[in-house]
Image (cartoon, grey):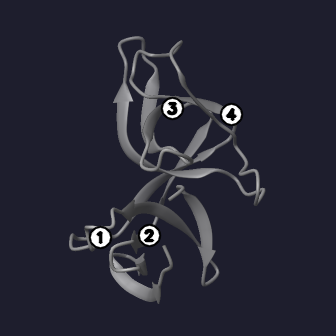
Amino acid sequence: MRCGAARVAGATVILAFALPAAQPHAGPVHGTTEVVSLSRAHKAVWALGDRGARGRMLQPWRPITGHRTVLPVEAHRTTADGVRWLRVRVPGRPNGRRGWIARRGTTLSRTSWKVVISTGVRRLRVYRRGRVARAFPAAV
């Protein structure tokens, strides 16, 4: 699954994660999710300190929809040189990839929406403030 924003019932929601086929969703869903909007292109690196290493360029606009790139934030770090970093879920393949982007050139916010896709039970659930707002069958 690709991370990003989607419109559901007139609100922007974050496609936060897809669960592997063998795992139906059983854990708690938190009331809000921290997200970051990209204001410029960012290079996502796989480990802090790998500035010159391989990574993936993330553009501020999604190529198909033209909407701003919005990614779930998993962690914050500040390195010894004073650069602030965000660990985000990186869109594209392989699924589930995480990377670090510089905090500069981003806008942090929170959303009360989350979409959870359980591929094993073929179900998509839309949560608002930690409660199921809608549920749909999903094709894998």
Mark 3 is surrounded, within 10 Å at the Cα level, by few (under 14), some (14 to 19) or many (20 or more) other residues, namely many
Q: Amino acid at mark 2?
A: Lys
Q: Which mark is residue 75?
A: none
Which residue position is annotated with label 3?
101
User: Left of 62 or right of it: where is 110?
Assistant: left
Q: Residue at x 69, y 53 (%)?
A: 68
Sequence-first tag of 3 and 2: 3
Q: Amino acid at mark 1?
A: Val
Which residue position is annotated with label 4?
41
Q: Are marks 3 and 2 in contact (CB under 8 Å)?
A: no
Separation of residues labelled 1 and 4 (CA atoms): 30 Å
Residue 47, relative to residue 3: is it above or below?
A: above
Q: Nearer the viewer, residue 22 or 97?
A: 22
Q: Are marks 2 and 1 in contact (CB under 8 Å)?
A: yes
Q: Residue at x 70, y 43 (%)?
A: 60
Q: Secondary structure at mark 1?
A: loop
Sequence-first tag of 1 and 4: 1
Mark 1 is surrounded, within 10 Å at the Cα level, by few (under 14), some (14 to 19) or many (20 or more) other residues, namely some
Residue 51, relative to residue 35: is it above or below?
A: above
Separation of residues labelled 3 and 2 (CA atoms): 22 Å
Measured as percent of width and height from the top left, residue 84 is found at 44, 27
Which residue position is annotated with label 1?
29
Q: Secondary structure at mark 4?
A: loop
Residue 131 occupies quadrant: bottom left
Q: Nearer the viewer, residue 49 or 129?
A: 49
Q: Amino acid at mark 4?
A: Ala
Which residue position is annotated with label 2?
114
